[in-house]
Image (cartoon, rainbow, N blue to C red):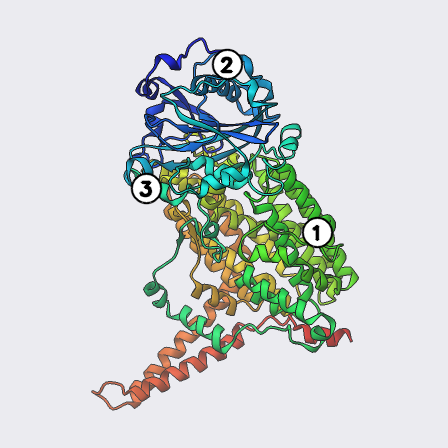
Amino acid sequence: MVTKTWDGNAMSQGDMMLKDTVLVLSEDDKVIGSASKKESHVFDEKQPTGILHRAFSVFLFDESTNELLLQQRASTKITFPNVWTNTCCSHPLHGMEPPEVDLPEALENGEVMGVKNAAIRKLNHELGIPPSQLDVTKFKFLTRLHYWAADTVTHGPESPWGEHEIDYVLFYIIPDKSVLTIKPHPDEVDAITWVTEDGLQEMLKDSSLLFSPWFRLIFQRWMTGKNSWWSDLKETMTTDKYCDYVNISRFDPPKEHFGGGGKAGPKFLKGDASKKQGAYGKIKTHKESKLLQLLQVDEVWSALTLLYVQPLVSNLETPHIQKTFSRNELLFCDQILGKVSRSFAAVIRQLPQQLLVDILVFYLVLRALDTIEDDTTAFPSMEKKIATLKDFYDNALVDPKWKLDGVGEGDELRLLQEFPKCHTIYSELNRDSRAVIADITKRMGEGMKEFIVKDMGQGTATVEEYNRYCHFVAGLVGEGLSRLFAVSGLESSSMSKEIHLSDRMGLFLQKVNIIRDYLEDYVDGRAWWPKSIWSKYSETGDLGYFCNMDDKKVRAKSLACLNELVTDALELAPDCLAYMSKLHCTEIFRFCAIPQVMAIATLDKLYNNPDVFTGVVKIRKGLSCQLILQTNTVEELHGIFYNFSQSIAKKAKRAKSDPTRERTQKACQAVFDLTESTRLRRTKMWKKVSVALVATLAVKSFVAPKKLALPLGYLAKGMALTVTTMLFWNSAIYPKNNKLKSAQKLSKKDA
């Protein structure tokens, strides 16, 4: 099986850099072109992490001793000389015979014969292992990793060389090393050694030895400890337990390999686990400066009011809750809620005592399930991840001792580690609430399984698939909440049948999050933007096309794509308003309305905003506080939706070249049609307030001594009269919605 068109023994290292043609890839491992080995490994300002290309890493084991064959790369190698690494690591090439290019369908069953053919070729070239001593069908393909590393250890902090690869990991077992002929090529390999796992651990502790960054990543992630590829070698080779042909794990290198000629920084690195957005800190969060935030005086006042004057009051200390639920376990649930969702925690805590703990537990259970789904690095194989997901929704709510370690980060990790405390509170809920939570958890988990096995590196395929994903992870949450509202007796039993509107409300919230998290999701390799939309704007056919905001053409197409997605989400707003109009309990109304107004405000912030493609966009904290304080009635909700839809409509009017402009304006008009009466009433109110203000100032000017400036006291009294007048007209012309009643009043009525 020796190639007919390539002879490594007849070429120098320089020859191979110029003549070898590697497979250039998109982020989802599609072959999109070719480049010379030299060109793909250059790290400079134009390409700070080189050109992404395909590679393979072979790990050859002696079955009799459970030893792994390592090689030390030759000192004459141009990239990463002198480093110890796995048995063989190189690149499949264009134009080889047998062919070394694998198409996407080769991944479906893990055959990847192209990569395996390349492995045979290079094991012969580097280590002198005759192809006749290897069976290409006995290579075990396990998974792929996407990594980059500048060769700063060899060439200094501004190294012109580096690696940027999607690496296919191949295992191979021989019965005994004595059956293998090994004659290392002096231009490729300086030394070889066979090591056990313990022996390798000792080598890694030796500071005088250098190791390749890709080998360190693979070993530390998948090959050490119990139930690892190496410790479980027989099962690794004879089953698909550890195989993952769907996902691509993505890693930044050890920090000493940052930099290079393009001064490359973290690309995938997980950072501060306390940050709940921005991919745990690895993606920039766009915020307005503190000065600009402080200049929003009304928002600053709202923040102070919410913090000190009118905070959301927690009902967890009510006698009913303290008597019904185990105190220590409830305290844990409350504390972990505040950790995993600071903003949503306060909204849950203000719920009435008949419903608060039910919703709290519902949220934590789904957050735990979501943590399992979101973790892209904790599981050695996709099969194991699916099994863990199923184990959760089958057993976590049944077995009081169920818990999970090693999945998630920070507080989400702790939530799963101490899940028995959540189970205790769950078991103390009424039977109907438990049934709702268990049903939604199972259905959501089944839906997540459907998408886990798909390659989501380039998003969902169609809008229909996009909607289906949003249904599983958010629409079902809306259904579950509606059913819990009905079970509590605080809302009509008919709410449990509002499946369509509940689903649409969930889709609205989820789509806003997905639009906002474009870059974070793309970097994680689990994106959700529908290809049927974004492919109309991407000229490369890749979802990552939109990241280059320095290119005017890319920028224009990126914003057009973004605006179509924003419009798609905005078209759900009328159904959200329809759902809200069916609620009767004030606390439940606020619980549902506050996330809705945050979402419409975020949607306005996202529209035509290039920052979406360079980080995470968030609304101001002061604005969030203002929205919380101003969301108490249907009229106030309508006013907020009207204002932000009006802002989007104005932006759309200015975006004259935007292809979705008319559709956006139509979506805004649909909101206007539902909220117009509120706007008219507010306009009348402010007209009368303006008249009152003018009249007040006129009277004070007449009373004050002529030819003198108005004394401060007169102005203060005038403003006080104006505020009093405004409050009078606000209550007379813009009354509170008398349809909504507090939980206490509703409970008395039922009694």
Residue 724 drawn at (x, y percent) = 45, 82
Image quadrant assignment for residue 175: top right
Q: Which residue is mark 2?
A: 130
Between the C-alphas of marks 3 and 1, the distance is 47 Å
Query: 597 above or below 322?
Result: above
Query: 80 above or below 132?
Result: below
Q: Secondary structure at mark 1?
A: helix
Q: Earlier in the sequence, mark 1 or mark 2?
A: 2
Between the C-alphas of marks 1 and 2, the distance is 57 Å
Q: Which residue is mark 1?
A: 440
Viewer-side residue, 721 vs 375: 375
Viewer-side residue, 446 vs 408: 408
- In the shown orientation, is residue 449 left or right of residue 88? right
Cβ–Cβ under 8 Å for marks 3 and 2: no
Residue drawn 69% across and 58% down? 482
What amino acid type is highlighted by mark number 1? Ile
Closer to us: mark 1 or mark 2?
2
Q: Which residue is mark 3?
A: 259
| Residue 522, visible in the rendered structure | no
